[in-house]
Image (cartoon, helix red, strand yellow):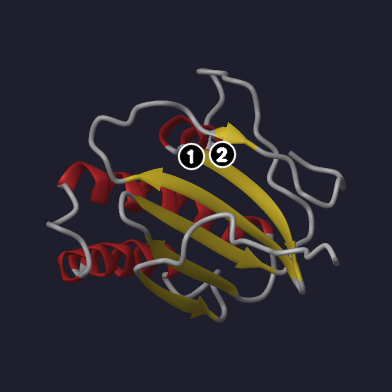
Amino acid sequence: MTDAITAERAAPEPLLSAGVVYGDASRSGAIASARAFTAEFLATAPAVLPGPVGDERVELAQLVVSELVTNAVRHTTGPCRLLLELGRDVLEISVFDQEAAAPVPRGHDPRRIGQHGVEIVVAVCESLTVEPAPEGKRVRARLSLLSEHTGPASASRPRTGGPGA
């Protein structure tokens, strides 16, 4: 008898997914465009879900997208790609960019102006991971679509064991 090794996806196949690439993200209004793309994507959710995604969840998704795309625009060069994957009760938001270094979460400091993006994402999402990608990294946030979810994300270090957050 031979042992078999099977692989399973960490998450089930998405019910709906869509992506967009922002070529020269620093000059093209990528952040506003990504927010609009996210709202339009979630407006299609009733086609695969029992009902619409609540306004609060749409706004949180747009906030997370804004923060992740802003990091890609400000701290990397070249294009970035936004990928949205809708599950039964979760939205996975991924931003791919060409910088290998992971974003560094900073400790809470109410006197600091700016640089709270990762802190915000961790506060509103179930999880935040940074994974190596063929030409850079993938930052993935998992946002519950259930209104009662209020728990903070568990931030994960890059899976390569490299430097970063």
Q: Residues within 10 Å of mark 2 (few under 14, many from 20)?
A: some
Image: 124 above or below 25? above
| Foreground of the two, 164 or 86 | 86
Residue 125 lies left or right of residue 58; in this view the side is right
Marks 1/2: CA distance? 5 Å
Residue 145 lies left or right of residue 128; in this view the side is left
Residue 159 lies left or right of residue 110; in this view the side is right
Q: Secondary structure at mark 2?
A: helix
Residue in the image at 56% along x and 53% along y: 140
Residue 119 position, x and y percent, is: 54, 32
Amino acid at pointer 2: Val
Quadrant that contains the N terminus: bottom right
| Residue marked by disc 2 | 118
Q: Are marks 1 and 2 in contact (CB under 8 Å)?
A: yes
Residue 37 position, x and y percent, is: 32, 70
Q: Residue furthest left?
A: 51
Residue 73 position, x and y percent, is: 57, 62
Residue in the image at 46% along x and 30% along y: 123
Mark count: 2
Amino acid at pointer 1: Val
Q: Secondary structure at mark 1?
A: helix
| Foreground of the two, 9 or 107 | 9
Image: 52 above or below 162? below
Residue in the image at 56% along x and 39% along y: 118
**Residue 98 got which mark?**
none
Image: 47 above or below 88? below
| Residue marked by disc 1 | 121
Residue 89 position, x and y percent, is: 31, 49
| Foreground of the two, 55 or 9 | 9
Residue in the image at 25% along x and 45% along y: 57
Residue 153 lies left or right of residue 62; in this view the side is right
Q: Residues within 10 Å of mark 1 (few under 14, many from 20)?
A: many
